[in-house]
Amino acid sequence: MFAAIYAFFNQVFASVFASNVQFQQLYYGGALMNGFVYIYIMLLAMCLILSLALPLDRAKPCFVIALTVFGAITICAIVGMVFYLAAAGFNPEHLIRNPDTWVWEGQGDTHFSWLVLAGVVMLAIYIVPFLMRPVDFLENFKGYTVGLLAYLLLIPMFTNIFSIYSMANLHDISWGNRPTTQTTGTEAFSAKADVQKQTQISYKAYRANFLFLWFCANGLYFVIVLELGKSGDEDEVNDGSFSVLDGFSMYLAGVVIFRVLFATAYVLKWQWRYSFNPKYKITENSLEQNFKELKKNKFSAESSDDVEDEEYLLKTAKDREKTLKKKSRRIGKTRKHNRVSKREMLEETKRLLIEEDIMTNMDDSDDDRMDFMDAKDEEVTDNLLKSHRHKSRPLKAHEVHHISQGLADNIKGSVLSQVMQNDEHAYLEVASAQLQ
């Protein structure tokens, strides 16, 4: 992310500030690019220190500040890229800077710009979702626009903040979503405190070594990007040569194209499977058909009168308006604004009736099964008490096991105590027999 922003910021600053006499010294003196680099590095360092030193709940406000600055840089970079690409075009003019006057002088010839092509590819990827669903985009223009802006603002959070926080907490193997816990998950290996402490020390040492190597690799990448930005003749642009910066930009664009192509191939593959392969076909459920089946089961006849069905559904919707508001998110949110259509009301009512019918059947089956088990336990209890009275002595373990038919675990302890006369040895024999 930093590489793309740096490369295009450099070109934007060159085209905007270097052509203005008042800002030329700022650009050629390195103040603009150095300021951008220092701010970016300071934010990354701040995120690292916060991730290492503070718990997440206390570091959250600082992360929000870093995210805001990162988001502003990202938006400025994207807006600057758009203006730069629009002004330059695919065939910008060959320019040479006069060292005496610091003015860029056009040479009259134009050359194809690989940097502009890479920028168009990387920015066009954000428009792909709109092109794939144009009708839905036009109908939900506000939602798509807000979603795109939110995505662009949150890109630094996923690429910078989340990455740094995860690398800085490699030693923490706990769930991570329990803010009250004081451990890092080492208690899962041993109940002994000294073993937990030693395990935690080992994990922290691994975290430190890995974090050091990770930052060295990122630092090397940072230096390479800086050197790429300085490669070539700084007093001549668009001379038609394929520079190292052009090659690096095309590599980034190639990664984007690779992802889009194979993601599209993956989606098409599964769409083909859903459409033509019987193994992957998805069974469609029709609320209309399910409702007719429900009526058929309840009233022993299937009605084909749609008007009658509609009247029944409208009456049910009116009688059970509170239940519908509670069950249905759609009606619950929009009823107060009077924006629920008649068709939506009918569909939600059908769904409610079908769900209640399914739950009723499940409850009935569960109740029947529980009643059967309770009756079986009562029968075993009666048999144990009868046998105890008949023998006029405490029952042995094998007798209890035989009479209970393996259900002694479900019998109340007071009953077993009564028929076995608190015989601890017999209790152990019954438990052993149940395990076998």
Image: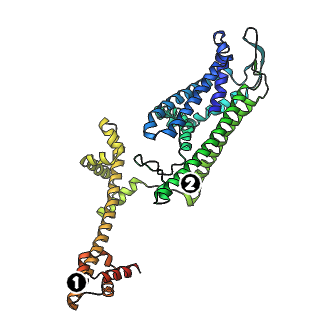
Which amino acid type is marked by label 2?
Tyr
Question: Tag on residue 290?
Answer: none
Work out whether residue 342 can be spotted: no
Q: From the viewer's perspective, is residue 344 above or below residue 93?
A: below
Whole-percent x and y of residue 98? 76, 11
Whole-percent x and y of residue 54? 47, 39
Few, some or many residues within 10 Å of mark 1 (<14, 14–19, 20+): some
Q: Nearer the viewer, mark 2 or mark 1?
A: 1
Whole-percent x and y of residue 358? 35, 60
**Residue sitting at 53 percent across and 45 percent down?**
169
Q: Quadrant of residue 239?
A: top right
**Residue sitting at 71 percent across and 25 percent down?**
90
> What's the CA distance linking mark 2 and mark 1?
62 Å
Q: Quadrant of residue 390?
A: bottom left
In this figure, which residue is indicated by the disc labeled 2? 274
The residue at the far bottom in this view is 391
**Residue sitting at 26 percent across and 46 percent down?**
322
Q: From the viewer's perspective, is residue 141 above or below residue 392?
A: above
Question: Tag on residue 385?
Answer: 1
Location of the C terminus by quadrant is bottom left
300 vs 107, nearest the viewer: 107
Which amino acid type is marked by label 1?
Leu
Local SS, label 2: helix
Q: From the viewer's perspective, is residue 386 above or below residue 47?
A: below
Q: In this rendering, would 293 be left or right of 172? A: left
**Residue sitting at 48 percent across and 50 percent down?**
184
The residue at the far top in this view is 101
Query: What colouring does the structure picture have?
Result: rainbow
Local SS, label 1: helix
